[in-house]
Image (tube, rainbow, N blue to C red):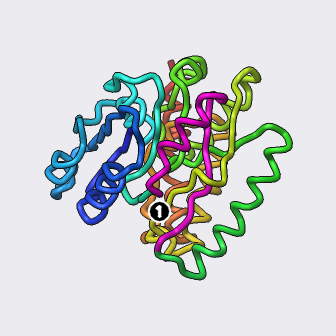
Amino acid sequence: MIIPTLNEEEVVGECLKSLKDQNFDGRYEVIVVDGNSSDRTREIAEIYADKVISQRSRGIGGARRDGVEASRGDLFVFTDADTIYDENWLSIISENLRRYDVSTGPVLFYDENFRSDLLQYWRKIYLLFHSFNFYWLIGSNMAIREEAYRRINGHRDISILEDFDMSVKTFKEREIRSKYDKNQRVYTSARRLDNLFSYFLIYVRGYYYYLTKHYDHLLSYPRVDKMDLKTLTIAEIENLNSFFKLHFRISRK
């Protein structure tokens, strides 16, 4: 179980308690990869987790991969610090990975509001892609066998769309068998959805840079509560200025 954290003292305790209370007979380890939190996140995590390590790689994707490298297992389960779980979650994952290489399931909200309901309706569109063997592996509810993880070179060092990137890579590797199980569900926080328009803008920006392969731009992005059209425009002007300065230096050489 691999969980990246950064200043999550308000939620990480409940997340880890939920993992410790799993109705699962097998052995498993809980690894927290902390990105240098300035609050009590690490202190709380050390009470419940088997390992708490410092993040070495860049981005949320890099933190997830750091957790893989610290793991002793051959099944990797990824989730987030603001998430809680049904007591049979690990048992369901274990059963799914007996027959499949990758498994995922619904990500619901434990603090529902009309914005989270809108996002839930939007995510139902993801189910249509299953007909084409494309499975959206949302970062808070994803499990994968080690062999499959190594085959696709694991997580990329990015902080946004790292789960979409994993989805694309497993889709392209045709021999990898994926499973969506409606019973493999988790419950996460709707706290990032207070400004749904900002949330949407961040991901539009992310998809643009993902498709154009400018992965460095996926390492950082404005906070959701600070994001609006003006902020996005200023950020893109700064990115363009950096691009032209770099291009000009290269041209002069």
Residue located at (51% from left, 71% from top): 193
Residue located at (69% from left, 25% from top): 176
Numbered circles on residues, count: 1
Count residues near mark 1 (Cα–Cα under 10 Å), then give few for <14, some for 14-19, many for 20+: many
Left or right: 195 as drawn, with respect to 43 = right
Q: Which residues are magenta?
A: 86-110
Residue 202 placement (x, y as % from top left):
56, 59
Instruction: Say whether residue 197 is magenta.
Output: no
Residue located at (76% from left, 23% from top): 174
Residue 239 visible in the snapshot: no
Where residue 108 sits, quadrant-wise, is bottom right
Residue bearing mark 1 = 188
Look at the image and tell me in which quarter the N terminus lies: top left
Of 227 and 6, nearer the camera is 6
Residue located at (74% from left, 20% from top): 175
Residue 228 placement (x, y as % from top left):
53, 71
